[in-house]
Image: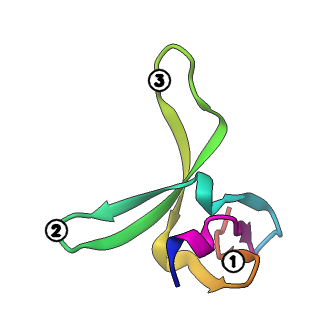
């Protein structure tokens, strides 16, 4: 499977059915030493604070991904 095939999939929390974002709008946190993906970073709210340029993210640990389906990516996040 290629990233191009995943980019339009909606990320959903299986615990409450909440739509968290779309993978194509996300970033990845990668452990450079091990070469592994650690987390998916979903921009929150207005993503960028106008003056500071900072981005606020919801961090989804890679091992929280339960299932990658045809239209969605199911994650297990306890809030």
Check the image and report above or below for 69 versus 4: below
- Which label's residue is closer to the chain start, 2 or 1? 2
- Side of 32 where 13 appears, left or right: right
Q: Residue 6: x, y in percent?
A: 61, 72
Identify which residue, 2 or 68, lies in the foreground: 2
Q: Are marks 3 and 1 in contact (CB under 8 Å)?
A: no
Residue furthest to the right in view is: 17
Label 2 to label 3, Cα distance in Å?
Answer: 28 Å
Image quadrant in which you'd find residue 45: top right
- Residue 33: assigned label: 2
Quick check: 4 above or below 49? below
Nearer the N terminus, badge 3 or badge 1?
3
Q: Residue at x 61, y 65 (%)?
A: 7
For the C terminus, the quadrant is bottom right
List the residue tagged with mark 1: 74
Q: Nearer the viewer, residue 6 or 72?
A: 6
Q: Label 1, secondary structure: give it.
A: strand
Residue that mark 3 sits on:
53
Q: Give the extent of the magenta segment.
A: 4-14
Q: How is the image coloured?
A: rainbow
Regarding mark 2 in the picture, which secondary structure is present there? loop
Q: Earlier in the sequence, mark 2 or mark 3?
A: 2
Alpha carbon distance from label 2 to label 1: 27 Å
| Crowd tier of the residue under label 3, counting other residues whose Cα lies within 10 Å: few below 14, some 14–19, many 20 or above | few
């Amino acid at each position: 499977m290629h990233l191009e095939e995943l980019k339009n999939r909606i990320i959903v929390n299986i615990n409450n059915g909440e739509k968290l974002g779309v993978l194509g709008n996300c970033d990845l946190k990668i452990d450079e030493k091990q070469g592994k993906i650690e987390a998916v970073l979903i921009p929150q709210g207005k993503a960028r604070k106008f003056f500071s340029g900072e981005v606020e993210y919801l961090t989804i640990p890679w091992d929280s991904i339960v299932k990658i389906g045809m239209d969605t990516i199911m994650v297990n996040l306890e809030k």
